[in-house]
Image: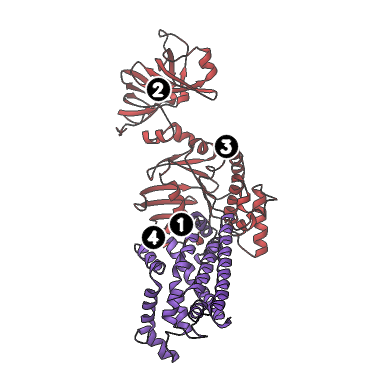
Chain colours: A red, B purple
Amino acid sequence: MAALEVSVEQTRPITLSAELACERGELLALVGPSGSGKSTILKTIAGLLSGASGRVRVGGSVWLDSAAGVDLPAHRRKVGFVFQSYALFPHMTALDNVMASASGSRAAKRRAAADWLALVNMKGLEDRRPAQLSGGQQQRVALARALAREPDVLLLDEPFSAVDQMTRDRLYEELAELRQRLSIPAVFVTHSIPEAQMLADRMVVLHRGRTLQSGTPESVYRRPQEPDVARLLGHKNIFEATVVNADEQSAVLEWRGLAIVARSAAVKGPAHFVVPATDIRIVDGDALQRRQNQFEARIASITPLGGIASIRAQLANGARVVLSAPVHIVARRGLREGGTVQLAIVASAVHVMQGSAEPK
Amino acid sequence: MDWTSLRLSLLLALVTSLLLLPIGALAARFLARTRIRGRSLIEAALALPLVLPPTVLGYYLLVGMGGGSPLGAFYERITGHPLAFSFEGLVIASVIFNLPFAIIPMQRAFEAVPAEVLQAARVCGMGPWRAFTRVELPLAWPGVLSGLVMTAAHTLGEFGVVLMVGGNIPGETRTIAIEIYDRVQAFDLDAAGKMSALLLVVSLIALGVTARAGRGARVL
């Protein structure tokens, strides 16, 4: 039994069909595009939405069980919530903001609030009002306020979306450090895959109100269950093919006239496969000494972005692949738009998925 | 210069404002957050005193408070004197015709409080009432205050409704606005001028305070 178990089934105000679980001390990322229902799920856990339908169980206590008529009001759920807008009380100082969620005598609250503010590196700024604090500082106060509640679960709604990149990087580090001390389940919402990969132990992919897949960020990225998940995670190389031969170690797919080797496939017949842009390599060599999964391609475009170039290339079978390579490699090999290049697709990175034909 | 009528006007303004503080704040909070269907209709009804001629409003209030109406009859049975043409009747009329002046600024102020801030209050462990008194009301306070000041200023200046409902009884219902009218009718332009100037200054101060409170709201 996980420390936090959530299942939501509703059609209003938005359609949700979501299930997630989070262990003590675990940081779970809820990932999906805007409008996918991420925030709604968080607010349902916190009891901030009326008419929620489903179950929320935290530790031994049931917060929501609409079938049994249980729906604890928000102020009786021990939840720490960091809002996207931080939602600090503008008429209170940083210290008063944190004290507002602490419990005990006034002196105890004051002490606890000061400690939490010190923990998030806000010592010395206790008497400032939110309007006198930077975005990053407000975020820290919001986090301290959430933790001062001594919550049974910590919820963070796009906590890094409203700060600049430098502040964000520092906040990442601070959160990574802080979570070592926390022994409660924590869920954060993000639409940034890199953020989830960097911070989360596990992630849950949400699309149109439905939880599609959960697992470690690495495994979900490497082995998406369906093309939708792959697309949401930013994969560019998603293709239709047919599994012609599969065993424990590997599979061979017929890909519009080409044969491509993949790591084992669980499906037979029509399928999709996905390969990360970083696992399509530029190789030397001529067409005579072909390696496994080596294909000749014509370069359609080269887009340098920072030190990495994104290269679009068309294979003999008409398929367009996207790969990325360091800019200096592109220069050394003399790659140019319209030229040809030898590509090798790493077989162990080719992941085969169920092949339902979906609308483009 | 007749201080009785000024004192009466100030008392009426004070009592009206004090009554409209809870009535107005709660109604404004309700209208700011509710999503019920009849909301527009309620808002329209509350704004009626802004557009109706004071005599029309006064007429309905007079009929509503007269001995023939349930309210008027009930009041007379309990107190022994009629509600119309009394200070109490004037207070009721004053509260009603001031509803839009109190509620509209208050409602705008409650609407301006971000929903997430209210949700934050709840997840901090505050129950609905505590969240209202500790977070929502303080944040909306400049607007609430401005509604009260508008009410007070408007009460000092109201003429038509007061005349219809209160008549013109010295020390009971003769407010300063009516006194000024009386003095002009009696060709005592000197006294009318002094009282008019006084009312002008009081109104100006009230509006100045409101503007200041409004700026305070933006600084917060």
Name the quadrant containing residue A50. bottom left
* Element type where label 1 sits in the image: loop
Q: Which residue is pictured at 65% across the width and 64% down the height? A: A106
Between A275 and A137, the residue placed more toward the observer is A137
Q: Residues within 10 Å of mark 4 (few under 14, many from 20)?
A: few
> Are the residues under marks 2 and 3 on the same chain?
yes
* Element type where label 3 sits in the image: helix
Q: Can you say whether A80 is above or below A73 in the image?
A: above
Closer to the N terminus: mark 2 or mark 3? 3
* Residue A35 screen position, x and y as percent: 41, 44
Chain for numbered disc 1: A
Q: Amino acid at mark 1?
A: Leu
Residue underneath mark 4? B35
Closer to the N terminus: mark 1 or mark 3? 1
Closer to the N terminus: mark 2 or mark 1? 1
Q: Amino acid at mark 2?
A: Val
Query: Which-is-in-front pick, marks 4 and 2?
Result: 4
Q: CA distance from mark 4 to mark 2?
A: 51 Å
> Are the residues under marks 2 and 1 on the same chain?
yes
Q: CA distance from mark 4 to mark 3?
A: 39 Å
Q: CA distance from mark 4 to mark 1?
A: 16 Å
Residue underneath mark 1? A48
Chain for numbered disc 4: B
* Element type where label 4 sits in the image: loop
Rendered image: mark on residue A321: 2
> Are the residues under marks 4 and 1 on the same chain?
no
Rendered image: mark on residue B213: none
Q: Residues within 10 Å of mark 3 (few under 14, many from 20)?
A: few
> Are the residues under marks 4 and 2 on the same chain?
no
